Image (tube, rainbow, N blue to C red):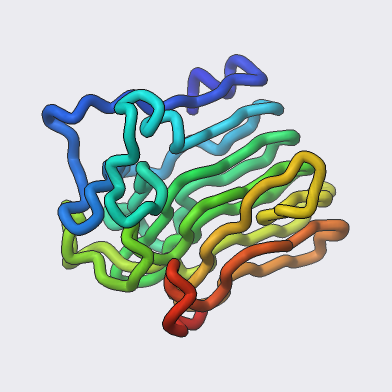
Amino acid sequence: LTSANANPGTTIVFQIPVTGAVTDTVSGAFVIQPATTLPVIAANGTSIDGATQTSFLGSNPNTTGGPPIVISGALLGANADLLAVSAQDCIIQNLSLSGRSAGTVRGIHLTGTANNNTVSNCVIGLSAAGTLTFSGYPTPAQAGPTAIGVLIESTAGTANNRIGDPAGTPAFPGNVIAGNTQHGIQITASSFNRIRGNTIGTNAANTAGLGN
């Protein structure tokens, strides 16, 4: 992210080799578990795509069909953001985002001048298997759901962001947003945002209610 912030328009790809990879032993997804808060995405046009890991391996390591890459907030402090965006025209897609057992980590935070950004095909609040069970994570006792799945708040004109949007042009698949301890999606003083085509408050299979 630090390099991307110095180079607007960067696409962040994942090419994690199988040997030595940290995985969720339940789903097989690769787990990234930062010990400190990641840099805010501040460069316009930044794209983060977990599906690049599938392209690198030739198949999705997540045997449940969910996102191949997990960003876990199990080791982060209270009120931290897994991914925060203050830039424009960024895309976050094909990731699984979860918090810590204390339930105070936010998933995606769009703030500042975050405009025209897209969040697509992510699982936010649940495990990589799309449930509230984190037993396969590297530190299962500390892992848990996020507090707020997606927070959009205007401090300097945040607007026109898309959370899912399968009917849009271009089309972006919806997200699974569930299990969050406070809110699935929270919008404060921000306008013209589109929230369409998401599965909210259920497991990934849409067969059981998990709330937010």
Residue pictured at 72% horizontal, 54% vertical: 165
Residue 204 image offset from top left, x and y in percent: 44, 67
Residue pictured at 62% horizontal, 64% vertical: 198
Residue 13 image offset from top left, x and y in percent: 45, 25
Q: Disc count in the image? A: 0
Residue pictured at 38% horizontal, 71% vertical: 103
Q: Residue furthest right?
A: 192
Q: Is residue 193 visible?
A: yes
Q: Residue furthest front?
A: 59
Say left or right for 173 vs 77. right
Q: Is residue 170 above or below residue 137?
A: above
The picture quadrant where one finds residue 33 is top left
Q: Is residue 21 above or below residue 172?
A: above
Say left or right for 119 vs 48. right
The picture quadrant where one finds residue 131 is bottom left
Q: Is residue 158 visible?
A: no
Q: Nearer the viewer, residue 7 or 24?
A: 24
The picture quadrant where one finds residue 23 is top left
Q: Residue furthest top?
A: 7
Residue pictured at 78% horizontal, 43% vertical: 115
Q: Nearer the viewer, residue 191 or 22?
A: 22
Q: Is residue 139 above or below residue 144?
A: above
Residue 16 image offset from top left, x and y in percent: 28, 27
Residue 47 image offset from top left, x and y in percent: 59, 31
